[in-house]
Structures are given as structure tokens and as C-alpha cells.
Amino acid sequence: MGNKINPNGFRLGITKGWNSRWYAGKKQYAGLLKEDEKIRRMVSKKLAAAGIARIEIERAGQQVNVIISAAKPGIVIGKGGESIKQLRGEIERLVSAGTVAVNVAEIPNPNISAPLVALRIAEQIERRFAFRRAMKQAAQRVMESGARGVRVILSGRLGGAEQARTEKVLEGRVPLHTLRADIDYGTARAETTYGSLGIKVMVFNGEVIGGKTETLARPQRRNDERRPEGGDRPNRRRPSARRRPGGE
């Protein structure tokens, strides 16, 4: 089941939270849901250069709070706060009623953010990079930044092939069935001359124990277990119980 379902949805309420946090009745629910989708599409398109990883929306009464997690918050804020003021005005035109507040959160390590890794791979493929090279380089960059594991999945007409297929790259370990595993999940789409390519990235950062993400130490061999250089391997073959023919 862990291989099929969305990793974020599988862990909602356990290690992951909701991107939209509000309550509405049956009559207002559909309208507010459409507003959230319009806000996310507009912000993602307008601030594509800022590296948007997550957009959270909170509603309380007539107050709408939009939290933008970005790798480059300076682009979101702009010089003297001009960009964020314009963004607030555009969001106010999308919502039906209420005042809008926009907050920006900086991503401390963009190299282990799954949505940003997926977007970077999509940009490289659209610039005609070799897809295998882009996937492997992205996975190596994630592991070098301190992640415990990463899985990259690319689907579509890879390399302009007539038949669509799927390519996967796995580094480290990504336990999809472990609910306490802190797995960041992101998707992106690369538009090529042969069609659209879908990209999925899953980054394993450790296990959430007691509300904190604990990174497990990688197993290492002890010095006394290492074979000395130039030494022969010990003969661990057991002597045969059968007596050879002709033996005494």
C-alpha cells in the first residue's frame, strides 16, 4: 500500500499536516476549496523563480493567512516589500471575503526539499539534459546534503521513445510503509517536444520519535572487523564429512 498511495496523504495526522486548515459548512466548502486551488496556482506561477516548496492556507473567521515556504524569500518579499504587497492584493481579488495576510518561511536546506528537487530535474530535462544524468545528479546531491535516502521516479516518453516507460533511481533507503518515517514528497512536470514527463521525488530524512525527527546513524564496520590490506581471507569452508574414494 505504501508504494501506491501518496506518502503525504498516508501520514496525515501522524507526521504530516494539512496544507489547508479551515472549517466550512456543506454550502461553502466547495467554493473555499476552489479559492485555495486558485491561490496556489497563481502564487506558484507568479513566484516560480523563488523556489516555492509549499503553500499553506489558514482561515479563521474573515481572516485568510497564506504561508509560503520558499528557497529564496527575498524574491517573494521584493525590494522594500513591494512584491509581497502586490501579491497580497492579487490574493484579495481571488478570495470572496475577508482580509489577507501573507507570511514567508525560508527553507533551510533546499537540497533535501522534494518539491524543489523535482522542479530542478524538470528544468534540466526541459533544457535537453540527459534524463538519467539529471536523476543521478539530483539523488547524489540529496544524499550529500544529509538525507538518509532518496527515490526519484521519471515517467513518460523518455528520450523521445515511441512507448512510454518508467525509470527509477534509489539511493539509501526510503521506507514507504513506516508511518513514523519523515518522508518529503514532491512532484513536477517537464514539458518536452515529445510530450509531458512526470517526476516524483521522495526524500527520507529520518524517523519522527516524540515529535522530533531523529536521523539514524549509518552502520559502520569496526576496525577489528576489517580485513588487513594484503591479508588472506579466512578459510571458512567446513571439512567434508564424506571420505574421498581411495582414502584411508
Image: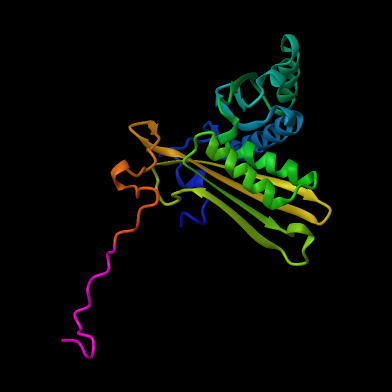
Give the residue furthest to the left.
248
Q: Does any portion of residue 24 appear in the rendered image?
A: no
**Residue that appears at 76% across and 18% down:** 86
Residue drawn at the location 61% of the way across and 48% of the way down:
200
- Left or right: residue 235 versus residue 183 is left
**Which one is nearer the viewer's eye here, 229 or 86?**
229
The stretch drawn in magenta includes residue 237: yes
In magenta stretch: residue 156: no
The segment highlighted magenta reads 235-248
Q: Residue at x 71, y 33 (%)?
A: 44
93 vs 132: above or below: above
Tell me the chief SS of the magenta region: loop
Q: Considering depth in this image, is 9 or 116 the residue closer to the camera? A: 116
Residue 225 drawn above or below residue 161:
above
Quadrant housing residue 75: top right
Say which of 186 and 149 sits in front. Answer: 149
- Left or right placement of residue 245 versus residue 18 in this view: left
